[in-house]
Amino acid sequence: MNIKKRIVILISGRGSNMQALVKANIAQAEIVAVISNRAEAAGLQWATQHGLVTEAICHHDYPGREAFDAALIEHIDAYQPDLVVLAGFMRILTSEFCRHYTGKLINIHPSLLPAFTGLHTHQRALDSGCRVAGCTIHFVTPQLDCGPIIAQGVVPVLNGDTADTLAHRVLELEHQLLPQAVTDFVAGNLVIEGNRVNNLAAAGTDSAVCLKN
C-alpha cells in the first residue's frame, strides 16, 4: 500500500508557494494543515477555500520566541507530519524547534545561498552588482539560512531591474522549484551527507533550474 507523506505548511502572508504546492497535487503527498502566525494571513483564506485544514497561532499571544515555538511544535505534531515546509514563514525559529524537526524541515529562501542570508535579498543582490539572482531550497538547521541545500534556481539580473521586478521573476522560479523539491523528498530521493544533499533521482545532474528571462 502506498502511504502518502503528511505535510504541514507554515505561512505568514498570502502563501503563494503554499498555493503552488497545493496546485502541484503531488501524488505521494498529503497536505494535512496550513498554519500561520498571523490570523489575517490571506493564505489561510485561500487554503480554507480549497478544503485544507488551517490554524492561526499568533506569536503576539506568547511571552517570547521560545514559548511560541513550543506551542507551534505542539500544534504541528498533532498532525504527525513527515515534512514541515516553511513557505514564506517570516519568523526566525529557535534552535530547539529546528532540532526537533531535523531532516524534515525545509525552507525556500529568495537568494542563491550562501549569499544574502536574511532579509532584503533582492536589493542586496542589485546593490552588489550581481549578474544572476535566484532562490534556494534547503533543510533548516539552527544556523539561519545555512542548512544543506536541496536545490537552487537562477534568473538573470536585467538592466533596469528593481528589487520588485527581480523579486517577481525569482518568485516564479520558486513556484517551480519548491513542488519538485517536495516531490523528491516524499519519494525518498534526498539523502543528506554532511552539508550536501544528494538527489538519488538526479542521476548525476545538478538540482538547478534556470530561467532565461
Image: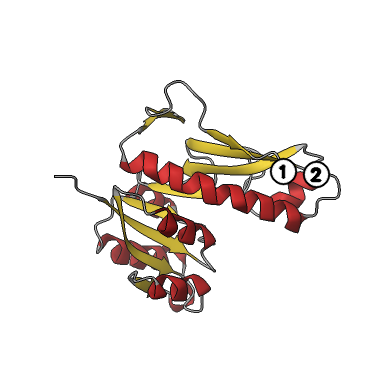
Residue 140 appears in view = no
Instruction: Give the residue at mark 1.
Output: 213
Mark 1 element type: loop
Residue 119 at x, y = what percent? 65, 54
Residue at horizontal 61 percent and vertical 52 percent from the top: 172
Q: Label 1 sits on what residue type?
A: Asn
Residue projecting furthest to the right: 160
Residue 207 in the image: state x and y as whole percent: 50, 32
Q: Are marks 2 and 1 in contact (CB under 8 Å)?
A: yes
Residue 146 versus residue 176: which sits nearer the camera? 176
Question: In the image, is residue 167 above or below residue 184?
Answer: below
Which of marks 1 and 2 precedes in the sequence?
2
The reply, left or right, for residue 80 in relation to residue 144 is left
Q: How many marks?
A: 2
- Looking at the image, residue 187 lies above or below residue 11: above
Left or right: 108, with 171 as reference point: left
- Who is closer to the viewer here, 186 or 20? 20
Check disc 2 and report its element: helix, strand or loop.
Answer: loop
Residue at x-position 35% and y-position 46%: 104
Question: Residue 29: x percent and y percent?
Answer: 31, 51
Q: Which residue is mark 2?
A: 158
Label 1: how many residues lie within 10 Å, few (<14), some (14-19) or many (20+)?
few
Q: Nearer the viewer, mark 2 or mark 1?
A: 1
Quadrant of the snapshot with the C terminus = top right
Q: Is residue 12 left or right of residue 48?
A: right
Q: Quadrant of the N terminus?
A: top left
Quarter-wise, where is residue 130 in the image? top right
Q: Which mark is residue 57?
A: none
Residue 115 shows up from this direction: yes
Q: Amino acid at mark 2?
A: Leu
